[in-house]
Amino acid sequence: MAPLDNTSGVWKSGRGKGRKTPKGRQLDDQAHSDILDLLGDHPRSRDLLIEFLHLVQDQFGHISAAHIRALSEEMRVGQAEIYEVASFYAHFDVVKEGETPPPALTIRVCDSLSCELAGAEQLKQALEDGMDPTQVRVLRAPCMGRCDTAPVLEIGHNHIDHASVAKVEAAIAAEDTHAHLPQYEGYRAYAIAGGYEVLKDLRANGDWEAVQDKVLSAGLRGLGGAGFPSGKKWGFVRMNEGPRYLAVNGDEGEPGTFKDRYYLERTPHVFLEGMLIAAWAVEAEKAFIYMRDEYPAVLEILRREIAALEAAGIVEEGYIDLRRGAGAYICGEESAMIESIEGKRGEPRHRPPFVAQVGIFGQPTLVHNVETLYWVTKINREGPECLNAVEKNGRKGLRSYSVSGRVKNPGVHLLPAGSTILDVIEAAGGMLEGHAFKAYQPGGPSSGLLPAHIDDIPLDFDTLQPHGSFIGSAAVVVLSDQDSARDAALNMLRFFEDESCGQCTPCRVGCEKAVKLMQAEKWDQDLLEELSAAMIDTSICGLGQAAPNPIRLTIKHFPEEV
């Protein structure tokens, strides 16, 4: 019988081209080696995708198609899925095949309201005119949480306060592109002063319901902006079967807000102890801290102090999981933040179910703001009277007002919750010389603009709603007679247009249409009101629902400008 390979047949005589590789983008050996080096012995968990993208971006200054392919190989996640996550966040530069990577150095100039008032637009233009675009990229960026030192820019990860072209040139010459850590109270100093004694005592023989009652009696409400009674959340989370998690919302992205950064850069352990008390109260198996990428110094402080807590045996290694945001305001919405913690696009979830029932990885999750947890420690160390004993204008408690704009001493001012705008301006040193008080933003762009004559309302929860506004994160921006309310409102809507996640049409299209209508010489007020009503009634989350506030309040209080 003839050998098989001596027989003739199509399989030998055919002229097919043959395929040496599988279809699709090929795995590049060098890119795969890069990814293996960067990921090291990290578990290839799907929820760590954003952390891994940061590693690539930090190392190479961009994320190439070859690195996406290698990351896909290593994580067993589709390239399209990685691309859609990377392209969602502003701090990732995705570079496709054949495209030119961005320059090695990026300067981000803040264009939020406080910085715009301080000349950010002119600064950005001067930098664009004076820099070599092949060496330096100049971008506009949303609020960096440093409104008290406007105008502000970030060169690499180095923030320059009261920025100027000369300061930028000096930083480039010195290759000063890394974050500068401020002086702060570290673990040892905090522990010597009695820190973590309350936590240890509660862990040994504490009653979580008694602690919850103490927090409720203090009157503490969520200081991220929602104002929900803080202690009540604990019971909601505990009524659901575990495992349970705690998530800290450190994505302080509302323009004009910088109170969380203020406390974290000075006394991080007051916050950390409060977080661990709350985690103890709900028996959380893990605590996640989601911190915005615009706070590189805070991220480094937290890395160091979490390591110190682990070394001291306060927490087990890995119990506190620090996650780094990537430039998305929408992740300040709690369900969008949870999506981002899971390594996904930060798109808000439909509710119900609420995150207290179905949060991180589908489990009950307690979500608190940074400053809220700061006060949890204070209440447990000093008693509820540290808040409820302070009373002014019929309101109880204290508020940390982030104050910027046309005042002499911008900064965080801790005042009674019953303070009016005149009290806040007085605490901030009064108006700048030559400026007369005209208007103010009481709680970030979401709260819109109020005129100077509405000056006797306590800036607290529930007091501003009758006027179509709210206190939110207590981000107070003061405008003067030299400023335009119309221009301020347009600045706010441009921010919302940039930061809309795009998931729902009313917000995505509504913000864009509003910006176009507001650029007209004369506003079409009827059409803007119709658009506002549609956005408020049908947007999925608070961004689209609150975005029309600047439009409505500017039309109402500054009709001569529009």
Image: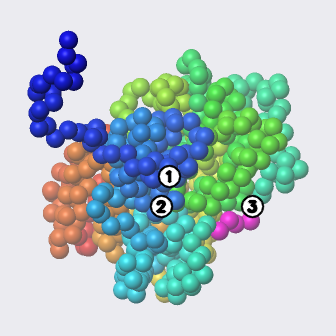
Residue name at image x 65 percent, y 43 percent: 373
Task: Describe the element under mark 1 as helix, strand or loop.
Answer: helix
Disc marking residue 494: none
Q: Earlier in the sequence, mark 3 or mark 2?
A: 2
Q: Main secondary structure of the magenta part?
A: loop
Q: x, y (%) of residue 412?
A: 61, 63
Does 249 appear above or below 207? below
Task: Describe the element under mark 3 as helix, strand or loop.
Answer: loop
Q: x, y (%) of residue 69?
A: 38, 46
Q: Amino acid at mark 1?
A: Asp
Residue name at image x 73 percent, y 46 percent: 307
Judging by the rendered image, the residue that carries numbered circle 1 is 34
Q: Amino acid at mark 2?
A: Phe
Judging by the rendered image, the residue that carries numbered circle 2 is 60
Q: Earlier in the sequence, mark 3 or mark 1?
A: 1
Residue name at image x 77 percent, y 47 percent: 308
Whole-angstrom CA distance, mark 3 to mark 2, is 31 Å
**Front: mark 3 or 2:** 2
The stretch of residues the image draws in magenta is 180-184
Does 217 appear above or below 205? below
- The front one of 332 and 19 is 19
**Front: mark 3 or 1:** 1
